[in-house]
């Protein structure tokens, strides 16, 4: 077990930021902590790292209790904060060297690791640049390099792709997968469900400080009734057709807006075929058809009654 | 060494900080130089004119001692003017023809118009005389046989002490204290640097602080590394500013130059430590803490006489405790005690108080910083 959180409670006055939160993360996982802003993800991470006091609970990393002086634990952790944590007055190379130096004392080894980190995040051309000269995406890559240069066994990334262009985002996500392939266990917090779906092996969904769902993305999707959503362009739509569609098996909800029919099905097979047959029988002309499997947003919506980005 | 080196680089690349720490004191010193340089040329050293009321039961021996006492350059220390009419003496004092009136009576006393270096010098002489006569009287009562030896010893001692008063030209320069205050201010600007040190290690203040908090290098070591790095740099800055005062602005610290530099280094240590305390204990954003630092070094420098030299004497009369605790005044008084009064004991006391303040501040901030978990980030 790499991380074990038991019954964690963190209050800010009357506000309960983390509410009896439990979590276990195994070695080699890319674990996603998904939730909207203010759901308690960062607070949980800060408690995990012993940066924050907490009211109740027990936290273990690598099988040992985590404390502010747990230096033997800290040496194997890499942290990439939500806010870019670098010195404005130091160059790319110097920043990575400085932070790596907090972990690695051997000069030759540190030099090698810093070079590897620069190469890993693709900042070789920018090694002499000061942070203020870097674009948002490059700055995020520097932030990551500072957190991973010492080759940690556990890497915690707290919303590392906020305000990052798609190209840099993809590079960051690919980098995370590569770090995992190299043996690191990853904890990845975000409110972007697409990222979690793309890279995480297991996911915890947080809301109001609680762990509302936990599992692989398939396990999470299996928790809800929604099977698929089919959308198609229709030239004509009447009350009669609406009733006929509703009468089909597994239909949960039917809506028609701006020439677009949207039908949500619970689990079940051949939903699309049945719908197409019905429209053919009724001689209804249709255009583009689009079928969508449930997303984590649907999971969140069904469990909490609100959208992830609310 | 890695962290000390990078911390130095961090500070050296902060242009604003360098401006305030190095360029600003040098520019201000240049203004002082041009403002007071001409005045100094006109004000060559002369004996300190002092009035004595001869009809006020003033001991003859005291008057003759005043007339005889000399600096090491054989220049009479006082130009004694004898008055029999008190009103005449007071008028001379009012017209600034004399800097003080000494009168007899049950106890010798000094009347001065203002508290300045000259009147302080007269008072120091008066106090020394009082102490010696009290000692002689006490010995006469308890052990009359030893009085003669004591008088001889005291006379020799008095000569020795008077000779130690280094009243050379620039030492009596009333504007030298502005340069002392300037060096004190340079030291005190170190509070800003200390504050940045404190901020950069606190997880609830800066992202860098959060990253450093989760590293396996103990916080105490990181705090000390930062402190050592910035202190070394600050010592260099103070040395440069002091050097510019001596070699460019013609401030002659004489044989005390080394002690002035040492005083500046002790002052820098304390200022860095106070800055660290501000970072740790003042709640709120960095801008607020910067405001507090600016207020601290400006007020401290003002109270030390940067803008108005006589303020320290005024404070000494009405609220002396401020002069005992204000870091700026401790630095300036330390320097003045060397150059004006030749009093190394007073210098040591001022510097020891300053160093103690610094040590206590460092201990408080380290105690507050180490092993801390934050309430919120």
Image: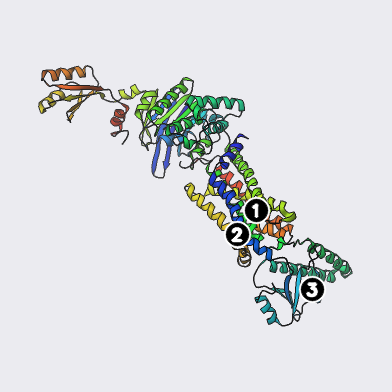
Judged left or right of residue B154, residue B18 is left
Nearer-N-terminus badge (2/3): 3
Judged left or right of residue A93, residue A177 is left
CB under 8 Å between callouts 2 and 3?
no
Nearer-N-terminus badge (2/1): 2
Picture residue at 45% right of the left edge, 32% below the top:
A140
- Helix, strand or loop at label 1? It is helix
Which is more toward the observer, B109 or B331?
A: B331
- The residue where tag 3 is placed is B62
- The residue where tag 1 is placed is B354
Which is more toward the observer, B295 or A305?
A: B295
Q: Position of residue B57 (x, y in %)?
A: 76, 79
- The residue where tag 2 is placed is B306
Picture residue at 54% right of the left edge, 45% below the top:
B15
Using the image, tell me which numbered label, if any, was put on residue B228.
Answer: none
Judged left or right of residue B358, residue B293 is left
CB under 8 Å between callouts 2 and 1?
no
Q: Image quarter for residue B177?
A: bottom right
Report the quarter where the N terminus of chain B lies: top right
Q: Give the Cα separation between the discs numbered 3 and 1.
A: 37 Å
The answer to whether residue B190 of the structure is visible from this angle is no
Q: Position of residue A49 (x, y in %)?
A: 49, 34
Q: Give the Cα separation between the discs numbered 2 and 1.
A: 18 Å
């Amino acid at each position: 077990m790499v991380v074990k959180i038991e019954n964690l409670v963190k209050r800010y006055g009357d506000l309960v930021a983390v509410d009896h939160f439990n979590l276990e993360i195994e070695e080699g996982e890319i674990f996603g902590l998904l939730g909207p802003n203010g759901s308690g993800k960062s607070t949980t991470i800060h408690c995990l790292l012993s940066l924050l006091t907490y009211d109740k609970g027990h936290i273990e990393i690598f099988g040992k209790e985590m404390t502010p002086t747990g230096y033997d634990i800290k040496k194997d952790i890499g942290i990439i904060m939500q806010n870019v944590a670098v010195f404005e007055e130091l160059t790319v190379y110097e920043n990575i060297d400085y932070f790596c130096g907090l972990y690695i004392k051997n000069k030759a080894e540190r030099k090698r690791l810093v070079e590897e980190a620069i190469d890993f995040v693709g900042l070789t051309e920018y090694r002499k640049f000061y942070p203020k000269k870097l674009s948002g995406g490059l700055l995020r890559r520097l932030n990551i390099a500072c957190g991973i240069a010492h080759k940690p066994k556990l890497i915690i990334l707290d919303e590392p792709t906020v305000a990052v262009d798609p190209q840099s985002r993809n590079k960051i996500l690919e980098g995370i997968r590569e770090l995992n392939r190299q043996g690191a266990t990853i904890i990845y917090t975000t409110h972007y469900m697409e990222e979690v779906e793309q890279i995480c092996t297991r996911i915890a969904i947080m809301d109001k400080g609680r762990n509302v769902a936990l599992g692989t993305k398939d396990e999470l999707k299996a928790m809800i009734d929604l099977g698929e959503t089919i959308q198609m362009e229709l030239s004509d739509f009447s009350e009669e057709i609406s009733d006929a569609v509703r009468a089909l098996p597994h239909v949960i909800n039917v809506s028609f807006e701006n020439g677009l029919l949207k039908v949500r099905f619970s689990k079940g097979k051949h939903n699309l075929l049945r719908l197409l047959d019905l429209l053919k029988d009724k001689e209804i002309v249709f255009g583009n058809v689009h079928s969508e499997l449930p997303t984590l947003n649907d999971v969140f919506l069904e469990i909490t009654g609100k959208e992830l980005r609310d | 060494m890695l962290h000390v080196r990078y911390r130095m680089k961090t500070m050296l690349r902060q242009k604003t900080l360098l401006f305030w720490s190095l360029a600003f004191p040098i520019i201000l010193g240049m203004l002082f130089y041009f403002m007071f340089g001409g005045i100094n040329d006109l004000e060559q050293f002369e004996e300190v004119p002092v009035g004595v009321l001869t009809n006020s039961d003033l001991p003859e021996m005291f008057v003759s001692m005043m007339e005889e006492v000399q600096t090491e350059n054989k220049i009479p220390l006082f130009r004694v003017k004898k008055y029999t009419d008190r009103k005449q003496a007071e008028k001379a004092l009012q017209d600034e023809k004399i800097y003080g009136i000494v009168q007899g009576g049950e106890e010798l006393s000094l009347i001065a118009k203002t508290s300045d270096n000259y009147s302080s010098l007269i008072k120091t002489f008066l106090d020394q005389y009082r102490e010696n006569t009290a000692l002689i009287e006490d010995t006469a009562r308890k052990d009359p046989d030893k009085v003669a030896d004591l008088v001889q010893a005291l006379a020799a001692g008095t000569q020795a002490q008077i000779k130690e008063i280094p009243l050379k030209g620039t030492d009596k320069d009333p504007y030298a204290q502005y340069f002392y205050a300037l060096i004190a201010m340079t030291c005190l600007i170190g509070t800003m640097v200390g504050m940045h040190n404190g901020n950069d290690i606190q997880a609830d203040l800066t992202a860098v602080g959060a990253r450093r908090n989760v590293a396996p290098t103990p916080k105490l070591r990181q705090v000390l590394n930062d402190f050592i790095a910035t202190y070394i740099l600050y010592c260099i800055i103070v040395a440069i500013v002091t050097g510019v005062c001596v070699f460019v602005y013609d401030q002659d610290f004489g044989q005390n130059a080394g002690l002035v530099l040492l005083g500046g280094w002790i002052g820098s240590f304390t200022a860095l430590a106070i800055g660290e305390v501000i970072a740790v204990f003042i709640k709120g954003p960095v801008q607020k803490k910067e405001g507090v630092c600016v207020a601290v070094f400006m007020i401290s420098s003002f109270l030390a006489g940067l803008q108005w030299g006589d303020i320290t004497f005024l404070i000494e009369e009405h609220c002396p405790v401020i002069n005992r605790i204000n870091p700026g005044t401790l630095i300036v008084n330390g320097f003045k005690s060397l150059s004006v009064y030749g009093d190394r004991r007073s210098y040591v006391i001022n510097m020891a108080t300053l160093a103690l303040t610094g040590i206590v501040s460092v201990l408080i901030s380290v105690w507050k910083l180490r092993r801390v978990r934050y309430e919120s980030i």
